[in-house]
Amino acid sequence: MKNIKVLITTFLMLAMLVSSCSPDSYSLDGAMDKSDIHFEITQDLATDPGGNTVILKNTTPGVILNWDYVTGKSDKAVETVKYAFKGNYTIKISAVTGGGIVELDPVTITVTQDNLNYVNDPLWTALSGGVGKQKVWIADNGKYGMAPGAMSYADPSTTVEWGNFTPNWEPEGNANSSTDADMHWGRTMTFSLEGGPFMKINEADGTLKESGTYFLDINAHTLTTTGATILRPDNYIANASNWTNNIKILKLTENQLRIAIMRTNSEGPWWYIWNFVSKEYADNYVPPVTGPSYDEGFDPTFASGELLKMITGGVGSGRVWSLDGNGNPVDWIGKGKGWTTGASSSYNWGWNDDWTAAAGNSWIRFDQFGGKLNYTRSQNGVVTTGLFTIDEEKNEINLGTNTLIQNPDSWMNPTVSVIKVVKAFNNDYLQKGIWFGTSYDAGKDEWFVFHYIIP
């Protein structure tokens, strides 16, 4: 017990001694004087007689130098810069020291000749249009057959590199949670090689918003901008801290640019993938008629009398059209594209056993006899007749007091007497049939249709 007491007393005395010797406050080293920070900037005239190749070298141990060399930025100890265009370039240098940031005197170098080999590359051309040209880009709204919308997400644990990336989620149209006001649709982003690597951002009305320079590293597949920032929605600006330096380029073609920015806010790291399309391509884009072969078609435009002849067979003739109950009876069609492949594609949400029963032996006959436009409608043996009119400018057929087909217990039941020819084939209607629209969804710009064929 005596030994334990002595040991405790010794520890207490040591603690008091240490406490009495400890300073009451702490301070960082004072800021270095800029005269104590050394570096070298040399032009390699052997490589480029015009001084286009410039070597930046940090010669001060323990200090990090940040180089801003107009066309890009770097904090490497040794950085080689290649200027493609002649002119004066002012290099700004700041030193990161133990005592804080020290701004050093800028250095201006003069390049006396162009060396366009440094920008004469397919990727430079894809981005800017080529030497002496400029190229305008806009955010992809998802309507140009490229990306689903303006942005995509990618898990930071996955590979996100040039030509090797797989988005986890791709919202359509606007970036996630972005309004049209956030997106600033109509703003443009221009990359130029007219006298230099210049970049500008313009408002939709052409007003200049930002102007600067850019550098494309064709080997690292990165983009660095100075004085101007890539297009992005307002509500995402605060979510990332690096919108300008060494931006990852994931894809760059004549018509498409996809780049990646890492999210750095409190939500945690995730890749934002920003999707752009060249304005020239977007302005001239014509959406193709896509989809499986059974949906090849169009919003029909017929010559005078052609639609009437198609449905009746001509003056003094009649033509019977049967509901395609055993094939693909119903569909939603927008801009010539449908979604269903058969009755099973819409089973329960649309077509079902009740419809199969209601539409048994269902057909409609259009004819031109006695100077009149007549129709005969049959559904499960119940026959109805009447006169119809046709508006060929609108591709509409008016059945007067009747509808195309009836199944009152179904939401698909037609309630209008005017039916729309939504899709047809001027030459192949005998094989492919005709789609009669009975209701229109303005929000989706889609028609709900019944498919009739010639039996």
Image (cartoon, rainbow, N blue to C red):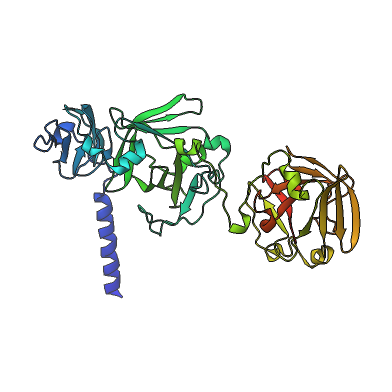
Name of the residue lying farthest toward the bottom: 1
- The residue shown at (45%, 33%) is 188
Up the image or down, 205 lies above or below 249; here it is: above
Report the side of 249 relative to 422 (left or right).
left
Report the side of 333 relative to 215 (left or right).
right
Give coordinates of residue 219: x percent, y percent: 26, 48
Give coordinates of residue 370: x percent, y percent: 88, 44
Q: Quadrant of the N terminus?
A: bottom left
Report the side of 197 relative to 336 (left or right).
left
Residue 77 can be seen, yes or no: yes
Residue 232 can be seen, yes or no: no
Judge by depth and name the residue closer to the eye, 364 or 198. 364
- The residue shown at (47%, 52%) is 153
Up the image or down, 88 lies above or below 25; here it is: above
Q: Quadrant of residue 128?
A: top left
Name of the residue lying farthest toward the front: 316
Give coordinates of residue 221: x percent, y percent: 31, 47
Report the side of 222 relative to 349 (left or right).
left
Name of the residue lying farthest toward the left: 46
User: So how many labels did they put on this image?
Assistant: 0
Q: Quadrant of the C terminus?
A: bottom right
Judge by depth and name the residue closer to the eye, 227 or 349. 349
- The residue shown at (82%, 54%) is 365
- The residue shown at (19%, 36%) is 32
Judge by depth and name the residue closer to the eye, 300 or 308. 308
Give coordinates of residue 325: x percent, y percent: 75, 64
Judge by depth and name the residue closer to the eye, 40 or 388. 388
